[in-house]
Amino acid sequence: GAGVSQSPRYKVAKRGQDVALRCDPISGHVSLFWYQQALGQGPEFLTYFQNEAQLDKSGLPSDRFFAERPEGSVSTLKIQRTQQEDSAVYLCASSLDRRATDYSPLHFGNGTRLTVT
Amino acid sequence: GNSVTQMEGPVTLSEEAFLTINCTYTATGYPSLFWYVQYPGEGLQLLLKATKADDKGSNKGFEATYRKETTSFHLEKGSVQVSDSAVYFCAPSNYGGATNKLIFGTGTLLAVQP
């Protein structure tokens, strides 16, 4: 496709359920980022992939959060045993260059809005 | 790590008014600086960037100058339009190991009235 695609667009989960959020980056993009955006806040960094390698997961808030990108294209963010504080928009962004941002812009998807009840 | 402080919104202006959205940052080293914009119902997209001191980024009539001495990157536009209504995010880059990630401000909602 022409842009970064995220699915589902909306997800409602009961507290304690596991969820999986999918990101299809732009074809050929090396770098992939996940961000979490709480209501009224700016996006906060979660994790970074360069191709299939997860090089930075310093922003993942707990061990309930797990991300993968096994073939260096599609990525999945999994949240186990969801809690109410996990409610947010989860954004995926990709970039052509391995040195993302300085040399090539981040392309963002529209995000997945997760609501935990 | 780097951090950013952005002018709180909402900012409400009439069409053709002058716009300034303030942004200051703290950083080790010399980050690149970015403004991203989020139009209603759309994903964030790059508006402009500056990669070194005194650089001016510009796009769609918006401008921002990288001021190292004041650690600022204020966004300006001389004459706003209704179509500029959106949320604007200031974002310095943050080098850390293999990652060059963006650190986003809280965002400033701009509402332009006809």
Image: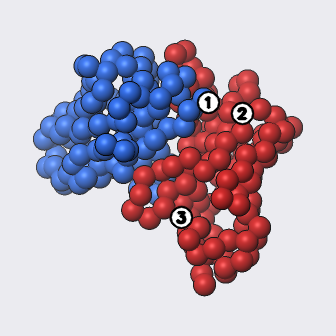
Chain colours: A blue, B red
Closer to us: B14 or A46? B14
- Labels 1 and 3 share a subunit: no
Which residue position holds label 3? B86
Are the residues at dot 2 and dot 1 in contact (C-beta closer than 8 Å)? Answer: yes
Q: Secondary structure at mark 1?
A: loop
* Image position, residue A89 (x, y; %): 35, 49
Residue at figure coordinates x 19%, y 33% from the top left: A80
Q: Type of residue at label 2?
A: Thr
Chain to which mark 2 belongs: B
Q: Type of residue at label 1?
A: Asp
The span from disc 2 to disc 1 (Cα, nearest Å) is 7 Å
- Kindly tell me whether residue B61 is visible in this rendering: yes
Q: Secondary structure at mark 2?
A: loop
Chain to which mark 1 belongs: A
- Labels 3 and 2 share a subunit: yes
Chain to which mark 3 belongs: B
Q: Secondary structure at mark 3?
A: strand
- Kindly tell me whether residue A61 is visible in this rendering: no
Image check: B43 left or right of B94? left
Image check: A112 left or right of B64? left
* Image position, residue A86 (x, y; %): 30, 44
* Image position, residue A11 (x, y; %): 20, 51
Q: Residues within 10 Å of mark 3 (few under 14, many from 20)?
A: some
Which residue position holds label 2? B51
Which residue position holds label 1? A102
